[in-house]
């Protein structure tokens, strides 16, 4: 038998066990009811999932039809995704050649091709740099490729005009000459031709003579290569280039891709026109 000292503890434990059995016994009905409700909700969720899966399957099936492709193409056009829309309409025409939607799809393809081409022409034009020949070479290749496609009359006209300008620019592209000394030595055969000097130093000057004696019309600069070979270069007064260089070249300015040209009737090899430069 338990000693008297353990009897209170035994009594307390017995009371606790009794309370636990009472709790579970009293709440058995509640627990069973909640379990039934959970099972019912689970069944409803499963049913909803099945409905969603069926609907997704129907949507997928619709997308794989000619009407599905056409609808998707229209959505892509509306959202501005022109390249993807054209691809979708092309796929419709390829996969469903006998569909009555093909003529409409081909009309959209033609319209999209024209819009895409016009956008590409604009991008090509903005990429051209007067000091970078490679941009013109690339433009010529891209425009020629565009003209080999069905891009519509308007786009074709603009591409043709730009390609003509690009080719003219390439045919008259500046001759690269490294230094002023070589430039002056070739004075006779360079008159009227553009020359590009990769690197030079430019400084504001006040010398006006020969073809550039009118200081109301020209800004005078001293152009130097190699630290000591120099020539007087002139930019048109009031022009963007001349006015930007006035302050920048007041105490010497390092420049690159310098485009210059002797006038056709140039009187001296020590004066030349400054057309453009990067700095």
Image: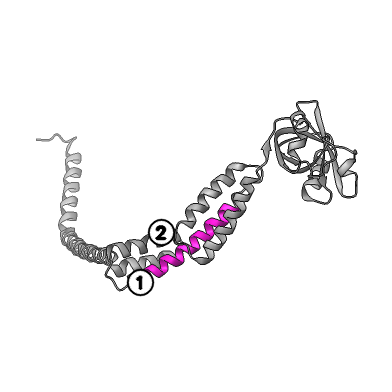
Q: Mark 1 falls on what kind of element?
A: helix
Residue 68, image x, y percentages: 31, 67
Residue 188, image x, y percentages: 77, 36
Q: Dot 1: within a 10 Å radius of its alpha carbon, few (fewer than 14), some, or many (20 or more) residues?
A: few
**What are the residue bounds of the magenta stretch?**
105-125
Residue 233, image x, y percentages: 81, 39
Which residue in the rendered view is the most extreme toward the front?
188
At 15% from the left and 57% from the top, the residue drawn is 25
**Badge 2 is on which residue?**
84
Circles 2 and 1, Cβ within 8 Å, touching? The answer is: no
Residue 276 lies left or right of residue 148; in this view the side is right
Task: Quadrant for residue 206, please give it.
Answer: top right
Q: Is residue 230 above or below residue 279?
A: above
In the rendered structure, does residue 5 fall within the stretch colored magenta? Answer: no
Relative depth, front residue between 239 and 77: 239
Q: Is residue 154 something one can see in this rendering?
A: yes
| Mark seen at residue 103 | 1
Where, quadrant-wise, is the N terminus in this rendering? top left
Q: Is residue 80 something one can see in this rendering?
A: no
Q: Dot 2: within a 10 Å radius of its alpha carbon, few (fewer than 14), some, or many (20 or more) residues?
A: some
At 35% from the left and 62% from the top, the residue drawn is 90
At 16% from the left and 40% from the top, the residue drawn is 10
Give the Cα separation between the discs numbered 2 and 1: 18 Å
């Amino acid at each position: 038998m338990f000693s008297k000292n353990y009897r209170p503890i035994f009594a307390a434990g017995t009371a606790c066990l009794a309370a636990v059995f009472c709790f579970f016994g009293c709440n058995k009905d509640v627990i069973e009811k909640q379990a039934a409700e959970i099972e019912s909700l689970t069944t409803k969720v499963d049913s909803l999932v099945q409905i969603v899966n069926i609907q997704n399957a129907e949507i997928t099936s619709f997308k794989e039809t000619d009407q599905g492709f056409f609808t998707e193409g229209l959505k892509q056009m509306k959202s501005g995704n022109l390249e993807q829309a054209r691809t979708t309409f092309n796929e419709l025409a390829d996969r469903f050649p006998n569909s009555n939607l093909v003529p409409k799809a081909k009309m959209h393809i033609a319209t999209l091709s024209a819009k895409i081409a016009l956008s590409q022409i604009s991008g090509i034009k903005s990429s051209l740099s007067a000091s970078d020949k490679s941009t013109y070479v690339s433009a010529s290749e891209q425009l020629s490729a565009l003209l080999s496609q069905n891009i519509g009359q308007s786009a074709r006209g603009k591409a043709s005009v730009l390609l003509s300008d690009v080719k003219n620019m390439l045919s008259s592209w500046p001759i690269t000459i490294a230094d002023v000394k070589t430039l002056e030595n070739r004075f006779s055969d360079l008159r009227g031709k553009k020359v590009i000097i990769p690197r030079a130093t430019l400084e504001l000057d006040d010398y006006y003579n020969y073809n550039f004696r009118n200081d109301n019309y020209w800004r005078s600069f001293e152009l130097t290569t190699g630290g000591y070979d120099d020539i007087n270069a002139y930019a048109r007064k009031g022009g963007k280039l001349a006015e930007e260089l006035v302050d920048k070249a007041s105490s010497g300015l390092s420049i690159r891709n310098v485009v210059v040209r002797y006038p056709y009737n140039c009187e001296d090899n020590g004066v030349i026109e400054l057309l453009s430069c990067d700095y």
